[in-house]
Amino acid sequence: METDREVMARVAGQDETAFSVLVERYGGRLLAVARRLLGSRADAEDAVQRALLQCYTGASSYQPQWAVSTWLYRILTNVCVDELRRRATRTAYGASYAAVDSARPREPRRDLDLHRALARVPREARVLLALRYAEGLSYGELARIRGISVNTVKSQLARGKALLREELGKRGILHD
Amino acid sequence: MTDLATANHLDDLLHDYFKPGPSPDGLARRVLGARRRDAEELGRLERSLAIQATPEGVSLIRTGKLDKPATAAARRLAEQAREEIVEYLAGRRAFFSVPIDLSGTPDFQRRVLEAAKRIPFGEARPYAWIAERIGHPHAVRAVGTALGRNPVPLIVPCHRVWRSDGGLGGYLFGGELKRRLAELERFTPILAGSTATRIVCRVGCHQAASMRPEQRVVFGSVEDARSVGYRPCKICKPLSAA
C-alpha cells in the first residue's frame, strides 16, 4: 500500500484519484473530530469539506517532514476553531449568516451530557482533548498541530480534564 | 471510587465519545466539485473593479472605468486599496487599513456609511439597525438608498446590511455577489498566529505577510492565543479589533 506521504506527493500534482485515497483514509477520522467539536453533523461535514479543499489546493506547501495526519489536523483545527469563534460572537442579527445549531438529533443521554460538559471547557483545551481522544495523538503531535509547546499541551489537557471531571461529576456521569 | 478509577473511566468515556466512523460516501467528489464552483464570481468582480482616490483616501470604487487618480499620493492609496481588496476576496484579509475619503458625501449618507463600517467582519445587521444608530429610526428606506449609493463598497461593508427577515436586500454589485461575500467572510478567519514568532495578528496584517502556510495557526480570540503562549501583534493590535 502507498504510504501517506506518497499519496500526498501525488495530491500535490493535483491528482484527483490520489486525493480520493487520502479522503478515504482520513475523512471519517476528520469528521469524528469536527463532529464532536462543532456538535452538528452538517456543520462538521462543512468544516471537513473546507479543510479538505484547503488540503487539496495547498498540497504543494505540504512538507514531507510532517506526518500527513498532523498536517491535516492542523488545517482542520484551524477551520473548527474559527467556526467556534464565530458561534461565540454571533449576535441575534448575525445569525442570518450561519445556520443556528438548534435541532439536535436524538442522541444518547450520556453523549449529550458529554457534549455540554465539553462546551464548558475553554476552546484551546477542547480542541486538544478532541485530538487526543479521537486520534490518540502524542503530546508532541498535539504541540505541532496547534503550534504550542509540549508543556502547554500537558497543562491544557490537564486543565480540560479537570473541568470535565467536575462537570461530569455534577451530572452523575462519573459516579455510576 | 479512587482517583485512578475516575481518571480511567473519563478516558474510556472520551475514547468512546470521539470514536471515528467511516469516511462519508462521495466526500472527495463533493470537495472537488465545490472547488470548481468557488471563487469564479469573486474573481470576475476583482478584475472589473476601478478605484478612484484623493490624497486623503479612497473616494470611489465601481465596476467599469474611472479616471486615474490625479496625484502620486492618491495613486498609492488606490494601489493599496486594490491590493487589500484582492487579499480580501482571496480570503486572506479580514480588515481594511486603507483610509477612505467621504468628504464629497452628503451628511446623512456619510452617517449611514460610518454606521455600516462598524458592523464586524463576518456579521450582518438589518437596515433598521443602521436607521436606529444614526438617530432616524423611521428612515429605513433612505438608509437602503444611501447604502445603494455607497461610493466605496467592500471597504465600507454595505454588503453586511440585510433585511430584518434575513432576506438579502439589494446590493450595488448584485444580490448574488452579496451572498458570495457573506459566504467568503464566513470562511475567512480573523485571527492567526505564527508558530515561528508566537505572535497573533489580525488576518491581513502585513507583519504576518511572510508567514508560511505550515506556520499558521488560527485562534478564536486573543485570550485563547495568550492562554497557549502567543502574544498580540503590536502593529495590527488584534485586541482593539475584537
Image (spheres, helix red, strand yellow):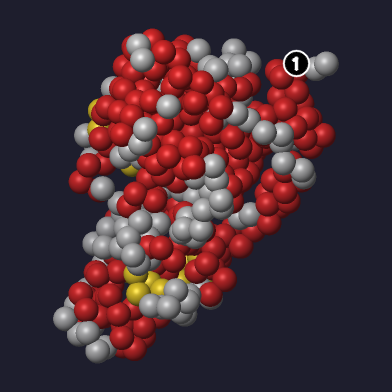
Whether B12 is drawn above or below B115: the answer is above
Where is residue B180? Give x, y as percent.
54, 63
Whether A102 is drawn above or below A122: the answer is below
Secondary structure at badge 1 equals: loop
Asked whether residue B211 is in view, the answer is no
| Foreground pick, B111 / B67 | B111
Tell me which residue sits at (77%, 43%) in the image: B25
Where is residue B207? Give x, y as percent.
33, 34
Q: Is residue A16 left or right of residue A35?
A: right
Whether B192 is drawn above or below A6: the answer is below
Where is residue A34? Give x, y as percent.
54, 38
Q: Is residue B32 left or right of residue A1?
A: left
The image shows a total of numbered marks equal to: 1
Where is residue B47? Give x, y as percent.
57, 60
Tell me which residue sits at (57%, 22%) in the image: A135
Which image quarter is the N terminus of chain B in?
top left
**Which quadrant would residue B199 be assigned to in this image?**
top left
Whether A13 is drawn above or below B104: the answer is above
Q: Would you name the residue on which mark 1 appears? A: A3
Tell me which residue sits at (30%, 69%) in the image: B116
Q: Is residue A66 left or right of residue B2?
A: right
Asked whether residue B123 is in view, the answer is yes
**Which quadrant would residue B218 be assigned to in this image?**
top left
Tell me which residue sits at (25%, 80%) in the image: B131
Dot 1 alpha-carbon crowd within 10 angstroms: few under 14, some 14 to 19, many 20 or more: few
